[in-house]
Image (cartoon, rainbow, N blue to C red):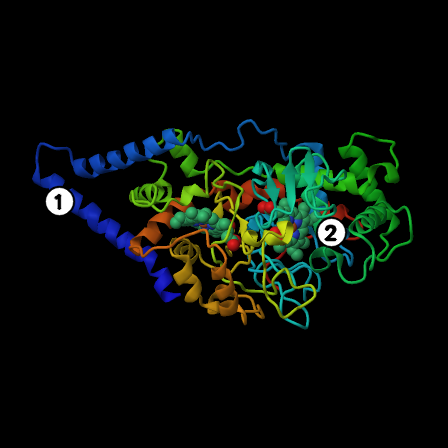
């Protein structure tokens, strides 16, 4: 850890030394404007980056040509209410926002998410703890919901919700089949799954033994106050509150709860809220659009390292983190240290292993492969990796520079969360290496880490770190007072 955090100052010191040395040269030559050699060098970097931007056709506007809703739209407003309501969880204790809070980078600041059985249901972030047993049951890190509408092909770290030519595939149907109930887009299809997961929202007893579909339907019935008498029945005032909200959002003032409050409409509204979270207006975009002062010289150096091919002074990061959304949506084994319970272990809880894409395709070559994440806003979406193994951005970048070395020397002490399983690290690494690793490492000058990190910081939209700007995506407290049973999540960081 000490070594890792040392890179920032080191990069700064090197940069200051260089900057100082340019100044001296300039002042010696009376005929040249003050900072000429520095600005010539800067101009060269800008020219090089300009070529890369042009060759790759980058425009830094991945939302171009996408039809994404505004947060002001009625459906997104209803979606926000639902996203923040614990009414969608079996035991009325978890909301989507518990693990995807707009003020926590659209995630939860945890390596591995904690849904049901928390010591204090409204606490989010790294002080959210599990009751009793401390080992987390959710095997993966919660990805950000920011810019979720920009994914073209796959949702989830293993892509188990997937756009096929003829429709959307989900885990509810056989491999490679289209799910007729998936909804109108990937985000809609995804939004139907968290409520069915025992560890995330469902709990152990709600609709126990039922299917994913019966669970969704029963949650919708409970919310609308119709159908079977169910566990955790809501008050009449609460179901009335939701009926009013659905009638307003769907502009159907006389429709009944069974007509309006369906699992389809719940997921559709959730998806509209999530798809309104477009946060792409970052310094890198301003730079690509021509404001050469929008990013620092260190970030420009980092950008060159990021985009240039190996052997041409770069690390070819963009061969996978491609295009304006910084992902090719493909699956790769980059040797992330295997921590946590793992996902392939339903029958054997001691396996602590996650085969990633293999769980979807059963193809041997897909073992340990995970989706290339987008890097937009990556500075605020930690911990990083599909399981949150890295808790600082520099250490994540070090991993990407030399995966095998980093995995071999991985220090579990960086995990801030108690109880995360780390017993199988070396055994899993050995198994990962028998497959195809998709990322070759190399020794690298330590200052490159700081440059790459400086570049990654330019991908943060200032809105996402501004409480006032994010306010539009968080339901107002007054609304929480209107919620008769007080099920709106009013998240807090402290127990
Ligand atoms: C307990 C924490 C938790 C809760 C509650 C939760 N999620 Fe998630 N979410 C996760 C985790 C963990 C993943 C990654 C799972 C995987 O890839 O296998 C995820 C994945 C996602 C993704 C996919 C993101 C991507 O980049 O592919 C979306 C979208 C999402 N969740 C939305 C929701 C919505 C909507 C709800 C409420 C209905 C919700 N989540 C509730 C933890 C949570
Ligand atoms: C071979 C494809 C590939 C290359 C090349 C690559 N990455 Fe990645 N990157 C991935 C994949 C796949 C993941 C997710 C791995 C996982 O979660 O298991 C990832 C994860 C990351 C993350 C964590 C993001 C998050 O949200 O958790 C960062 C940061 C990152 N890469 C930066 C870089 C940098 C910087 C470079 C160049 C030095 C680079 N990557 C090169 C495929 C690649």
* Mark 2 CB lies closer than 8 A to ligand 1: yes
Question: Residue 237, percent across and down?
Answer: 85, 47
Asked if residue 332 shows in the view, the reply is: yes
- Residue 66, located in which quarter of the rendered image? top right
- Residue 257, located in which quarter of the rendered image? top right
Q: Which mark is residue 24?
A: 1
Q: Residues within 10 Å of mark 1 (few under 14, many from 20)?
A: few
Tell us which disc is closer to us: 1 or 2: 2
Residue at image location 57% in from the left, 68% down from the top? 420
Q: Is residue 172 left or right of residue 6?
A: right
Residue at image location 68% in from the left, 38% down from the top? 168
Question: Residue 370, percent across and down?
Answer: 54, 51
Tell me the quadrant of the picture where the C terminus can be found: bottom right
352 over 154 or under it: above or below = below
Q: Which mark is residue 207?
A: none
- Name the residue beneath numbered marker 2: 195
């Amino acid at each position: 850890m000490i070594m890792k955090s040392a890179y920032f100052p080191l990069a700064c010191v090197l940069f200051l030394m260089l900057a100082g040395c340019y100044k001296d040269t300039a002042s010696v030559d009376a005929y040249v404007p003050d900072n000429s050699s520095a600005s010539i060098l800067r101009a060269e970097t800008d020219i090089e980056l300009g070529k890369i931007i042009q060759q790759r056709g980058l425009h830094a506007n991945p939302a171009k040509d996408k039809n994404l809703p505004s947060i002001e739209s009625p459906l997104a407003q209803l979606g926000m209410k639902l996203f923040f309501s614990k009414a969608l969880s079996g035991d009325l204790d978890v909301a989507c926002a518990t693990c995807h809070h707009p003020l926590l980078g659209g995630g939860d600041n945890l390596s591995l998410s904690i849904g049901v059985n928390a010591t204090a249901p409204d606490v989010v972030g790294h002080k959210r703890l599990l009751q009793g047993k401390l080992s987390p049951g959710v095997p993966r890190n919660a990805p950000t919901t920011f810019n979720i509408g920009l994914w073209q092909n796959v949702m989830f770290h293993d892509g188990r919700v997937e756009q096929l030519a003829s429709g959307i595939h989900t885990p509810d149907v056989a491999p490679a089949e289209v799910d007729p109930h998936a909804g109108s887009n990937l985000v809609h299809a995804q939004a139907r799954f968290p409520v069915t997961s025992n560890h995330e929202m469902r709990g152990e007893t709600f609709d126990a033994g039922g299917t994913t579909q019966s669970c969704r339907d029963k949650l919708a019935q409970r919310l609308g106050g119709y159908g079977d008498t169910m566990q955790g029945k809501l008050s009449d005032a609460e179901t009335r509150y939701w009926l009013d909200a659905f009638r307003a959002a769907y502009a159907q003032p006389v429709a009944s709860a069974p007509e309006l409050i369906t699992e389809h409409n719940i997921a559709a509204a959730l998806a509209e809220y999530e798809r309104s979270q477009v946060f792409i207006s970052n310094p890198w975009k301003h730079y690509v659009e021509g404001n050469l002062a929008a990013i620092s010289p260190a970030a420009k150096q980092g950008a060159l390292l990021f985009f240039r091919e190996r052997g041409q002074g770069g690390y070819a990061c963009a061969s996978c983190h491609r295009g304006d959304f910084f992902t090719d949506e493909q699956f790769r084994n980059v040797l992330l240290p295997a921590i946590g319970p793992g996902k392939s272990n339903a029958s054997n809880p001691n396996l602590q292993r996650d085969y990633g894409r293999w769980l979807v395709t059963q193809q041997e070559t897909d073992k340990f492969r995970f989706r290339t994440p987008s890097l937009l806003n990556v500075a605020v979406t930690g911990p990083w990796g599909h399981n949150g193994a890295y808790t600082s951005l520099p250490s994540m970048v070090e991993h990407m520079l030399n995966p095998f070395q980093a995995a071999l020397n991985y220090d579990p002490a960086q995990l801030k969360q108690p109880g995360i399983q780390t017993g199988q690290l070396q055994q899993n690494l050995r198994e990962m290496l028998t497959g195809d690793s998709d990322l070759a490492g190399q020794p690298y000058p330590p200052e490159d880490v700081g440059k790459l990190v400086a570049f990654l910081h330019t991908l943060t939209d200032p809105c996402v770190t501004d409480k006032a700007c994010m306010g539009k995506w968080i339901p107002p407290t007054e609304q929480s007072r209107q919620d008769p049973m007080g099920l709106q999540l009013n998240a807090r960081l402290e127990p």
